[in-house]
C-alpha cells in the first residue's frame, strides 16, 4: 500500500514515518496527523548549489597559494643560483687580478736584477780596448775606408786643425804619417784623417800642433765642405782614448 505526502505529494509506503523528499514526519498512518521535522525538512548540505561554489573557490584559492609559494621558491632558488654564480665569477676575477699583479711586480724585479750586474773597472775596459787595437798605414786605410769601418786602430799624429762641436765634442784633422828630415829638428807629419773626440770634464784642451797617440774605431769615409766650398773626403776615426805626447 502507498500513501502520498500531504506536503509534497510524494508517494510513500504506508508505514513511512518521514517523507524522503521533503522530510515531513507522520504521526501514524493518518495523513492528517502528519507533522514536519524541521531538521529533516532542510536539504542536505552537499545538495545545496552554493556548497559546490564554495568548493570551487576554495580549490582556486589553494591552487593560487601553492602557485605563489612555488613561484617564490623558484625565484629564491634562481636568486641563490645567480648569487652563487656571481660569487664564483668574482672569485675568478680576483684570482686573475692577483696573478696579473704578481706578474707585474715580478717583471721589474727581474729587470732590476739584470741591471744590477757589476760594472767593469774603467781602467780595465780601457786596457782591453787599447790591447785590441791594430795599426794600419794611411795608404791602406784611405784606399777604401768603408772596408775597415768598425775596426779598432791605434795611431800617432799631429793635430793640424781643431774645431769645437756640440757639447764636449771636438772635430779634428790629424796628420798620421811621420817623416824624418835631416835638415829639420822636428819630424814632418803628412796624410790627413778626420777625427772626433769628447774631451772629459776638467781635461786640458787639444790644440793645433799637439802630437797625440790615440785609439779609436774607424767610421769609414767622411766627406765635408771646406771654407772655400770644396768637398773633401777623408778616412774618419772616432777617438775613444788619447794621450798627449810631450
Image (cartoon, grey):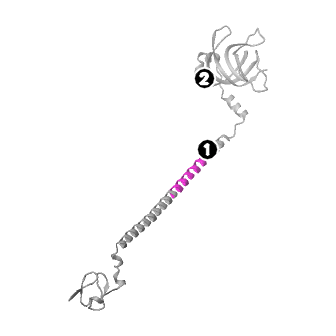
Residue at 65%, 43% (x, y): give it: 113
Q: Main secondary structure of the magenta part?
A: helix
Q: In the image shown, does 62 or 192 lie closer to the viewer?
A: 62
Above-or-below relation of 158 to 23? above
The stretch in magenta equals 84-108
Q: Residue reaching furthest left?
A: 1
Compared across the picture, whether 6 is left or right of 59 comes to left
Residue 46: % across, % down: 34, 76
Residue 211, visible in the rendered structure:
yes
* 52 and 161: which is toward the camera: 52
Between 124 and 161, the residue placed more toward the observer is 161
Q: Is residue 103 above or below residue 70?
A: above
User: Does the image show residue 16?
Assistant: no
Which tag is nearer the camera, tag 1 or tag 2?
1
Residue 233 in picture, x, y percent from top left: 62, 14
Which label number is shown at residue 107? 1
Q: Is residue 130 left or right of residue 30?
A: right
Q: Quadrant of the C terminus?
A: top right
Residue 7, placed above or below residue 212 = below
Say which residue appears at 34% left-offset and 72% top-offset: 49
Q: Is residue 132 left or right of residue 34?
A: right
- The location of residue 135, given as percent across then percent down, is 65, 22
| SS type, badge 1 | helix
Residue at figure coordinates x 66%, y 40% from the top left: 115
Q: Does residue 99 appear left or right of residue 159 in this picture?
A: left
The answer to which image quadrant residue 35 occupies is bottom left
The span from disc 1 to disc 2 (Cα, nearest Å) is 38 Å
Please tell me whether mark 2 sits on a helix, a strand or a loop. Answer: loop
Look at mark 2 in the image and give the residue it sits on. 149
How dense is the environment of label 1, judged by Cα within 10 Å: few (below 14), some, or many (20 and up)?
Answer: few
Amino acid at each position: 500500500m502507498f500513501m502520498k505526502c500531504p506536503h509534497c505529494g510524494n508517494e510513500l509506503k504506508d508505514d513511512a514515518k518521514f517523507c524522503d523528499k521533503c522530510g515531513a514526519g507522520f504521526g501514524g498512518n493518518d495523513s492528517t496527523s502528519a507533522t514536519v521535522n524541521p531538521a529533516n525538512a532542510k536539504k542536505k548540505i552537499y545538495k545545496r548549489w552554493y556548497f559546490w561554489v564554495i568548493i570551487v573557490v576554495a580549490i582556486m584559492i589553494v591552487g593560487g597559494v601553492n602557485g605563489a609559494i612555488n613561484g617564490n621558491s623558484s625565484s629564491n632558488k634562481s636568486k641563490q643560483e645567480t648569487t652563487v654564480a656571481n660569487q664564483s665569477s668574482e672569485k675568478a676575477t680576483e684570482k686573475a687580478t692577483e696573478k696579473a699583479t704578481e706578474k707585474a711586480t715580478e717583471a721589474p724585479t727581474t729587470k732590476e736584477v739584470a741591471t744590477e750586474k757589476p760594472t767593469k773597472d774603467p781602467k780595465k775596459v780601457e786596457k782591453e780596448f787599447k790591447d785590441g787595437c791594430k795599426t794600419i798605414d794611411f795608404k791602406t786605410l784611405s784606399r777604401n775606408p768603408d772596408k775597415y769601418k768598425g775596426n779598432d786602430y791605434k795611431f800617432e799624429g799631429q793635430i793640424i786643425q781643431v774645431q769645437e762641436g756640440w757639447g764636449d765634442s771636438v772635430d779634428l784633422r790629424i796628420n798620421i804619417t811621420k817623416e824624418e828630415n835631416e835638415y829639420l829638428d822636428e819630424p814632418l807629419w803628412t796624410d790627413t784623417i778626420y777625427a772626433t773626440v769628447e774631451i772629459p770634464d776638467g781635461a786640458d784642451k787639444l790644440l793645433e800642433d799637439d802630437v797625440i797617440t790615440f785609439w779609436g774605431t774607424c767610421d769609414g769615409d767622411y766627406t765635408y765642405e771646406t771654407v772655400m766650398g770644396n768637398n773633401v773626403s777623408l778616412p774618419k776615426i772616432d777617438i775613444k782614448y788619447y794621450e798627449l805626447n810631450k
